[in-house]
Amino acid sequence: MKRSLRSALAFSLLLAPAIASDTGDLPASPSGLTAALQAIVEDDGAPGVAVLVYRDGGLVHQEVVGEIELDEPLLVASASKWVAAALIMIFVDEGRFSLDQPIALRMATGLPDAGQITLRQILSFTTGQGGIESLADLSQPADISLAESAALLLSRPLEDRPGMVFRYGSGAMQIAGALVEQVTGERWEDTFQERLAGPLGMTDSRWIHPLHPNLDPDAVTNPILQGGLITTAADYGRFLTMLADNGVYGGSRILSERAVNEMETLQTADAELAYGSIPRAKGWEWQIKGPDRRQRLPAGYALGSWCELADQAGRCLMVSSPGALGAWPWIDRESGIYGIFVMRHRFPRVAESLLAAREAILGNR
């Protein structure tokens, strides 16, 4: 059972949502949306799928098809990365550490080359520490500290020179989490609740170790930051609303606009793209948008999220963070529309229908 869960987590990408009420700009049911959501259930085998769609800070459409509850807390797998990156960027904003400072200046590393790894490389999966197939973080106990987790990861031989190769899903976010705990003197979970979940009203969100989901939360001192967030569609929608408003939520600033811009800047344009064992869905590509054309290229990565569409300066125009076990959050900067799909099904089985569902939403903008 553990092995099958590990395999599912290793295929970390997205998920889907759909039907309930309409409160704004989009049609009651955008043309083609319901059909795409029904295909996810009837053809792709998902028990149910739901979607929340927002614009200008307000919910404009929600839809549910099949058996799923919108308020049900779900493990969102790789959609966790975006949230973890945002919490880390709060401390970059405060000058507690820098995106481009070698980590050796703040913690001991087992190998000299590992000491040159930077926070930017951690959040863009270019540390040289391998990819998700190694299960380097998931294989660790849930009751060690993030500092111990980081030490174990930093003692592993590097596969690539830091900054040169993108390998999705290494355990490197544990290292960033250890840095956060170092500067705050608090557990990651406590800092998350105080600095992000609390201000955003994410009342049903917490971090776990996915291979030990039933442990008492107080016993989980090594939460998996790239894949261990439990949350609801509405909670994640609040997080997206903050990012969509360039770091502001409910009139309070959570992140600086500069931090949000950093998070939404393509980081892997000059890196070799080595995806490891992650399945590539049809249509899962990013684009560089020029004045007269869009050039199709392999998917690129920003800080904690995928950059599906970028302008020529590397600014991401479509950003998302799909998770294999139940969520696909995204922000379309060109239209101002953003949202999240949720469900309990593997991404490769629903990818084409899910992309069709999002296109139906954006096509009705």
Image: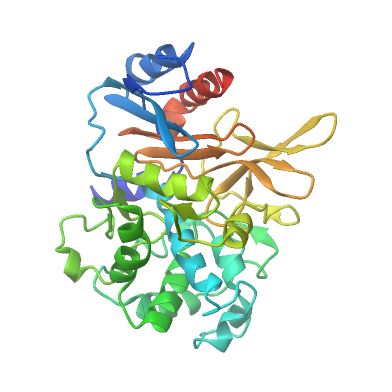
Q: Position of residue 16 (x, y in %)?
A: 39, 30
Left or right? Give the position of 282 relative to 32: right
Residue closest to the eye, 147 or 17: 17
- Name the residue at 46% across, 41% down: 322
Q: How is the image coloured?
A: rainbow
Is 157 in front, or is 16? 16
Say which quarter of the image contains residue 102.
bottom right
Q: Quadrant of the C terminus?
A: top right
Residue nearer the viewer, 165 or 362: 362
Image vertical order of residue 126 relative to residue 98, above or below: above
Placement of 233 over or under 48, stated as above or below: below
Total labels: the figure holds: 0
Q: In front here: 292 or 240?
A: 240
Horizontal and vertical percent position of residue 148: 36, 80
Write the residue at 39% across / 19% down.
Answer: 37
- Residue farthest to the front, as pictured: 251
Does 211 appear above or below 160?
A: above
Q: Is residue 47 above or below residue 3?
A: above
118 sits left or right of 279 in the view: right
Residue 336 appears at what percent x and percent y?
A: 57, 35
In the drawing, does residue 118 fall left or right of residue 239? right
Q: Residue 26, percent across and down?
A: 47, 20
Quadrant for residue 47, please give it.
Answer: top left
User: Which residue extends farthest right?
Assistant: 292
The residue positioned 23% from the left and 68% from the top of the image is: 220
The answer to whether residue 317 is seen in the rendering is yes
Residue 128 visible to an observer of this rendering: no
Q: Residue at x 51, y 80 (%)?
A: 96
